[in-house]
Image: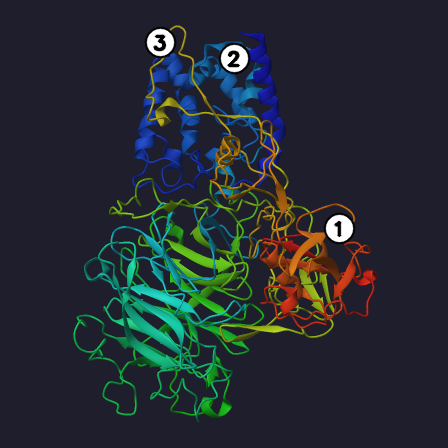
Amino acid sequence: MNGVRFQALLQSCWLLVFVSPWLVGSHPQCLDYKPPFKPPEPLTFCTEYSQFGCCDSEQEQLIMRRYYRVMDFFDYSGYVACGKYIQSILCQECCPYAAHLYDAEDANTPMRELPGLCGEYCTDFWHRCRSTLSLLMEDDEMIEIEGDRDKFCAFMELKDPEYCYPNVLTNAELNADLGAVRTDPEGCLQLCLQEVANLLRNPVAMVHANDGTHRFFIAEQLGYVWAYLPNGSRIDKPFLNLTKAVLTSPWAGDERGFLCVAFHPRFKSTGKAYVYYSVSVKREERIRISEFALSVNDMNALDPASERILLEVVEPASNHNGGQLLFGFDGYLYIFVGDGGKAGDPFGEFGNAQNKSSLLGKVLRVDVDDNSSGPPYRIPPDNPFVTDPRSRPEIYAYGVRNMWRCSVDRGDPLTRTGRGRLLCGDVGQNKFEEVDIITKGGNYGWRAKEGFSCYDKKLCSNSSLDDILPIFAYPHKLGKSVTGGYVYRGCEMPNLNGLYIFGDFMSGRLMSLKEDPATGEWHYKEICMGKGQTCNFPKTINTYYKYIISFAEDEAGELYFLSTGSPSAAVSAGVMYKIIDPSRRAPPGKCRFTASPVTVKGKLYHFHPRKRFLNPPKTTTAVPITTPILTYANTTFINRFVTTSSYPTATTTIRGTAATAVRLSTTTARLSVVPTPPIYFPAKTPTTQRPRVIYQPPTRRPEKPYQPAIRPPPKRHETTSRYHSLAETERPTTPRPGFHEVTAMPPPKTQNLNVTSVPKTSDKRVKGHAEELGGSNGQTRVNKKGRGAVQTKVRQRKLKNGAVRLESNGEKLPDRGRVEIHVKGEWGTVCDDLFDSKAGAVVCRQLGYPFVLRVARRAEMGEGSNLNILLDDVKCEGTEKTLLECKRAKIGEHNCSHKEDVGVVCGYDEFEEE
């Protein structure tokens, strides 16, 4: 055997010995880096994994063929002595922990070609069948190892007594509830996520057209609806653009805007879609429900000129706008309208929600079929109040406060149990959030009740209330603004069938309810992000942005949610995630579908995920005192949790909930909830990693079928080499909920660009240089000096009044420094008097950053002593374009010194660590 090859082999063996203890926290995973599954038919050869594992009957047949090809080298006695060993070793590809047995979980180590054995089993195997190693490896150079027990078992052993074969079969802890959803010691369901879309501005809804194309459509609060192909590519032109009509603002927590879109259940033939959005008509705020028709020229666009208004409802306040549209299985359009706003539904004697002559605080049901002529909608004949002259006939249910996100249960795939149920999250006032099942004619209690408790004691004691109680309600120590979700009825995650998954906008919690079919009661379990290696699958992550805006379901029934790092319609911090169960998947091929073709006119923007899987680090970091949106008084931040000595000085209203900026830790809640997510350290620069050798048995490679070994010698087995790197991080993660990191990017330089003006001239030399720069005569381009470049006249870009830059007397960093402002041809500094995070946000936006992470006072970023002080007493609202538009002292007038020069730290994510 070649000496160099043998030395490398031994190094590889010892490397496996030393790295295996790191993998103690393993999890079920197959060699294709996916969770195990239940075979559609029980296995007959690899019977150890007949009920649950990583093989179906087709894969088992390939293993069986390989087994008989190896056994062709044996006589009868060898067949009797070694057959069971070889069968067991080959069948470990079917083990639910195959990735661990083959060292495939760690990208930094070479993957084994054979599974790791336990020490005693390896010794017994060596004594009885040592000569089979070269046959199993299909490499006659293994003969030298076969003669030495120490070398043989150094190569074959897995130095982890819990996971090596055959202990992995008898380990009670590993095999307890194998295949069920994993839970942590506190009973929290451990799930994972896959990023599907990003750079969204307050994504309020995702829907599908149910037309066989498997496209999905994401609506943004600004008024855009974008069409995506099944592979995640976005079409460049919006499916619908209502930004000129939609009433909203960039303020965080503004409840107005484009709120929902729903497709007609027969969209493929009708081409109709319905939208719900806020408008201002003669200075009167309204919600508008409109119908649009598909463009005759483009299947990926609605015709904006086809708008037909179905319904408008006057909103007495700017909050509690409702915002849900959906079609039930009865074919009718359901409209969920808020109670009109303010607090406590103060309108009239009983409030809007209990007043059946008002459409506010109601669930409406209308018929929009065959409405081409006549009224835009008709009243379904079985609506519950159609014969009551004092009630609006559109009403289907009443007594709701501000239902935010409702869904229709598809029903159990086999029994159809639950099919057609309407489940909604109803945002509470100041104590409880609730989840309801909507029934015809039901009274859901608001404002008499909030959750299970009385809100208006007088109304609550009224015997005629006859209200329907929620299936679940939770107090504000768990969250302050419920976001309704879906009952999972998809194919890919069989463990989740029947699980109602929802969340909370303010706390960022993911939660679930499961119905007990015997009692009809719903049982609560929290959802947390998988820890350690649990979510370490390709394209799978364990963090998310905390502000959970909406849940969604694709055409195949898989479940998603949309959240953002900043609840502002002006910030592209929104992401859509697919929910993944890392414990079990459907059998290969069961969930395949063929999407109908889509004709695309225009460009496609291909999806690129921005997040990575995060391993929890061993250290934590303190949260900065200021945030871009909220300010706090007398607040001390310690290791991501909050203690306060007084109440917050600022609150923000999110979907009708008065949500304080700081919440006290409670001993009753398992998570100390803070509205601002944990701050992460920037990720380390990935180190160069050596290639990992991934064993792919010929029976598992369809592109190169297995070739029988030719005796003697056996055919040398080929391996493939892959690079698979995963950057380590130092960012602390909170398992429940996990929040996203954002990799910071350098900002675009907006100040002091060195530019070249290419003059209009007939000089061939200058013209050639203009072409070299990629521009035509008269264009202004960035001057990239290099060998052979023509030196032309360089001029400084003219700066406007109010332009800013960040300077520092120490280390120069683009995202932080002393604030200097340009006024009337002069650069000067700004004093820190009254300068807060809102003023800092104005500066950061000018420089291309969406967030201000911190305001630095008392000349922390250095004194600009060589400049004049130009601004003092700057007080901003946060929406101004420059500091000159803020309230301030006159230019040049101040009562401060350079020891009070203010600075800022900017960033691309409001939660990134500075």
Inter-mark Cα distance, 2 to 3: 20 Å
Inter-mark Cα distance, 1 to 3: 73 Å
Q: Nearer the viewer, mark 1 or mark 3?
A: 1
- Residue that badge 2 annotates: 146
- Of mark 2 and mark 1, the one earlier in the sequence is 2
What amino acid does circle 1 point to? Ser
Can you give x and y, in whole percent of width and height, for residue 58 in the image?
A: 30, 32
73 sits left or right of 150 in the view: left
Near mark 1 (Cα within 10 A), the count class, few <14, some 14-19 or many ≥20, is some
Residue 406 visible in the picture = no
Q: Secondary structure at mark 1?
A: loop
Can you give x and y, in whole percent of width and height, for residue 621 in the image?
A: 70, 53
Front residue of 563 and 607: 607
Instruction: Please report contact status of discs 2 and 3: CB closer than 8 Å, yes or no.
Output: no
What amino acid does circle 3 point to? Ile
- Residue that badge 3 annotates: 710
- Residue that badge 1 annotates: 808
173 sits left or right of 316 in the view: right
Which residue ends up furthest to the front in the rendered image? 762
Inter-mark Cα distance, 2 to 1: 67 Å
Instruction: Please report contact status of discs 1 and 3: CB closer than 8 Å, yes or no.
Output: no
Q: Secondary structure at mark 3?
A: loop
